[in-house]
Amino acid sequence: MTTQNPANRVRYAPRSTGERRGRRAALLRRSLAGLVGAAALSGAALGQDSIICGTKFNDLNHDGVRDPGEPGIPGWTIVANDPNCQVSWVATTDANGDYCIEVCSGPNAIQVFEQQRPGWRQSAPASGTYTFNINIPMGIGGIDFGNYDTTSCPAEYYSLTLRSGVDDYGAPLPLGNGDPSAPNWQIVLDPDSSTVEPRPAVAVPQNTSASWASPMGTSRWISSTYATGTGTALNGQYAYEMHFCLDPRFDPNQTTLILQVRSDNAGAAILLNGTGIGTASAPNVTPTPIILSGGSLFVAGDNVIRINVTNSGGATGINVFGSLGSENGKCCCEGRDVNKTLNTAFEDDPLPPQTPSMLLYPLADDDWQLVSTPSGSTPQPAIVLGNTTSGSVLPGTIPGSWLTTGCPNTAWIGASTAGWGYAPQGDYTYEYKFCLDPRFKNPQLNICARADDFGTAFLNGTLIGPISSFSSPLSCYTVTNPAFFLPGDNVLQVIVHNTPSGTSPTGLYLCGTLTVDDGRCCHCATAPPAMVGWWQLDEFPLVTTATDITGSVIDNGAYLGSAGPNNRPVTVNPGMVTRAKDFDGVDDLVQVPDCAPVPAACDELDFGLYGGTNNPGDGNLSIDAWIFMDTYLGEAPIVDNRGSILPPPHFDLHVSGYYFFVSDGQLALKLETGTTSPVCAPYVDNRPLPLLTWVHATVTVDRSGAVVFYVDGLAGTTSGGPSGGVTTQQGSLTNAAPLLIGAAYPICAQPWMYFNGKIDEVEIFSRALTPAEVWEIYDAKQTGKCRPDYSGGDTNCDGEVDILDINSFILAVGDPAAYAAAYPGCNVRAADANEDGSVDVLDINPFIALLAGG
C-alpha cells in the first residue's frame, strides 16, 4: 500500500526534526485510519497488519542526514521484505518523497530497503537496510533513505585525501568506529551473512599484531569488524571501496591519483573503476606508491577505488595512504573567499538582512571552530567572550589585560561562557578554513594575535610562529610563501595553551586578512552569445529601474508592488551574484514594457518567426536565473511574456508567448502560439527543487527539437506539454504584453501569481544554449558573468570617441531600432553617456563632454 499526500498540499519551508517527526506521525495516522476507519488505533483494530513510513530525500551534501533544504525524491521504490508472511511489499514515494508500506505483524524480522537506481549512491542508512522485529501490530515512522546524484560533484571533492581510519579533520577515528561522512572507506563485500553492505569500515588498533605496528603517516588500519580489539574476522573475500567525484569538465591529463596500500594478506588487488592498477604490500612492508596520472581510467562523475582482500585466517584489514588532485575541474571556492577578514568575534559574511558587525557575548563565531578541547564535544563554534571595542563585556570582571586593543572589529573568543572564559586546563585548538582555487596566485595571509595563556599558529600544518600571551603585544605575521597554501581547503590553526591547574581564563584574540590573485574564482565567466536580456536585479534600495545591461535594444523594467512597507521587491545583500531582489509573493514584480507596435524589429524579447533585432527568426530561446524559494505555493513565476491580441480582461483568447515558472516544486514552461484557446499544458522537469537554497534554473527551447530543463547546470528529463511535443508548436510567440519577472498573468484559469523568495541574474537568449554553456553560467556561481564594457561614446564601434560618432549617437538616441539596423554588432548602450541605464536626451551633454575629452 502506498499512501499519497493530497494533490493540493502546499509545502512550506523545510521543517525542523520535530516538525518532520510530526508530519510522519500524521502520515501514519492517516494511513492507519484508512485501514481501520474510525476505530481506535489498537492492535485489535489493526488485525495482523503494521504500517512503516518514512521519507526518501536527496542528500545534497552527502552526509547521510536530511538537512534543511534537502528535498524529498518522488517516484522511488521502497521494499519491505517480510519472511514470516513470505512476501515482499512495495511502495512508491509521493511528490514529497514520503511513503507508507503495509506489512504483516510478527513475530518476525522485517527488512526495509530501497531499489537502487543508476547514477545515484545511497548515503542513509549507513547499512543500506533497516532491520527490526515486529511482534505486535504497530506503526513505525522515520524509516528514511538518503541518496545523492553521482553525476554532480560537491566542490570539496576536487582535492581529496584518501587516508584510511581518519575523519574529516585529519584526526584518527576512535577504535571500532567508522567514518560516517562521505567520501569514506566502505565494506561492500563481507563473508559474514549477519552484516549488511555497504557499511563504513571501522578503525582497528595498530598493534593488533607486530606486523601492524606502524600505519602510514596519520592513517589507521581499518577492517570489517572491531571484534575484540584484534581485527579478527571470518575467512573469505572482503572488498573495500571509496568513491570520489570528478567534475564533468575535469582534464584527465591533469588528474593524479597516488596510493600506498598495505593489506593483512599481501597481493590484494587494487582497482580503479574496475581496472587493476596494482596490488597491496604486506603489513610490514613499505608499499611502492601507485602513481596514476592522466589516462582513460578516470571518468566524469562517480569514480571507485576498490581493494579486494582474501582472509585466510585471523586478523584482516587494510591501511591506505594517498591523495587525489584534479586540475580544471569544478572550482571549490567562491569569489568572496579571495578577499576575507579573519577577525575573531566579527561576522564579516552574514546572512541577509544583517550587515557585517561585531558579535556580542555569548553568541557563537561559527567562522572559528574549536576542534580540540580537554573536555571534548568538538567540533563546535567558538563563543564570543566580550566585545571590548564597543564596551560590551562578558559577565564578571574582565581581565585588564584583555582590554588591550590593537585590532579593530575584534574581540576574544573561547570555549566556555563561564566567568570570563573560564575553562579547564589544557590545549584548545581553533581552526579557520578558507578555500583557494587550484590556479591561485600571489596569496598573502596577514594575522595579528594574542592568546590566554599563549599559543602557536599553523597554516596547513606548517608552523607560522608563536602567539604572545594575553598581556603582551600582539604577535603579527605575514605569510606569502605559496608552499604554505593549498588548492582547495586551507586551514589556519591556532593551538592555545591554558596552563594553570583547574579552571582559568582562556581564549583567542586574532585579526587578519587573506588576499589572493588570479584564481578561477576571482574571475567572471564569459556570457554566451545571443543574449537579448540581462537583468542583474542588484540595484540599490530606492532605485526603481531594473536595468537591462545587454542587447542592442534597452529593455529596462520597473520594480512594482503596493503591499507592505517596501512597496516593491526588496534589495538583499548578498544575493547569489552581488545583490538580488526579494519578492514578497503578494504583488512584487518587475515589468518590462513591450516594444510596440507588433511586429516590431526592436522587440528582441518576442520570439516570432519573422526575425528581427537579435532574433534569427527560428523561434528558439533560452531563459536562466538564480532563484531562492521561500515556499512552494502553487505556481512560482520566474519570467512571463504571454499576451492576447485582445485587451484585458480577455487574457485567455489568442494567447502567444512563453512562461517559465516553478510548479509544485518543479521547473515548468508553457508555450502559447496564438491558438483560439491557450494550450495551457506545461512542459515539466522531473526533479524537485529545494527550498531556502540558491538554485540555478534554466530552460532551453529548440522548436525543431525539444524543451530541456537544467538544474544547477545539469539537464533533466522533460515530460508534459501538448501532444507531439514542441515540434507541434511552430506558431509565433510574439505579443504586445509587457514581460514580467516574478509574476504571471491570469491565463489558463489561474489568478495573478507571484514569486515568494529571491531572484537574481535573469537572462534571456534568442537561441537554445548548449549543455556546456549552461554549465559555464552555473559554474560561475557568485562571481557571475563578465559585465559588458560598452566603451561609452563609441557609438560607431571604431574604437575611438570622436566626431565620427555624432551621427550614430543621434540615431541611437532618436531611433534605437534604426541604430541597430545601421550598426549591426554595436550596442546602443554606448550612447548611455551619463551611465544612468537609459539612452535619452539626458545623454547629450555628457556625450559632448566625452567628445571634448572631459
Image (cartoon, rainbow, N blue to C red):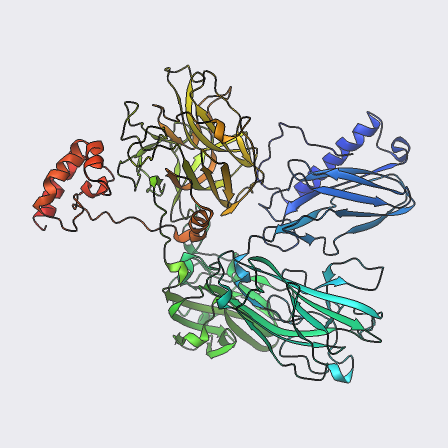
Place residue 521 in its image quadrant.
bottom left
State the residue in front, 777 or 237: 237
Q: Looking at the image, is 52 positioned above or below residue 439? A: above
Tag count in the figure?
0
| Relative horizontal placement of residue 405, taking residue 304 as reference (left or right) | left
State the residue in front, 663 or 682: 682
Residue at (74%, 46%) from the top-left corner?
143
| Relative horizontal placement of residue 74, taking residue 453 as reference (left or right) | right
State the residue in front, 11 or 733: 733
Q: Looking at the image, is 169 positioned above or below residue 57? A: below
Residue at (68%, 60%) from the top-left corner?
180
| Relative horizontal placement of residue 456, taking residue 129 as reference (left or right) | left
Residue at (24%, 43%) from the top-left corner?
825
| Residue 5 at least partly seen | yes
Q: Looking at the image, is 19 positioned above or below residue 211? A: above
| Relative horizontal placement of residue 278, taking residue 527 as reference (left or right) | right
Q: Looking at the image, is 809 positioned above or below residue 165? A: above
| Residue 398 at least partly seen | no
- Position of residue 3 measured from the top left corner of the image (x, y, whole percent): 74, 33
Quarter of the picture holding the N terminus: top right
- Position of residue 125 measured from the top left corner of the image (x, y, whole percent): 72, 53
Place residue 276 in its image quadrant.
bottom right
- Position of residue 343 measured from the top left corner of the image (x, y, whole percent): 43, 64
- Position of residue 420 measured from the top left corner of the image (x, y, whole percent): 53, 66
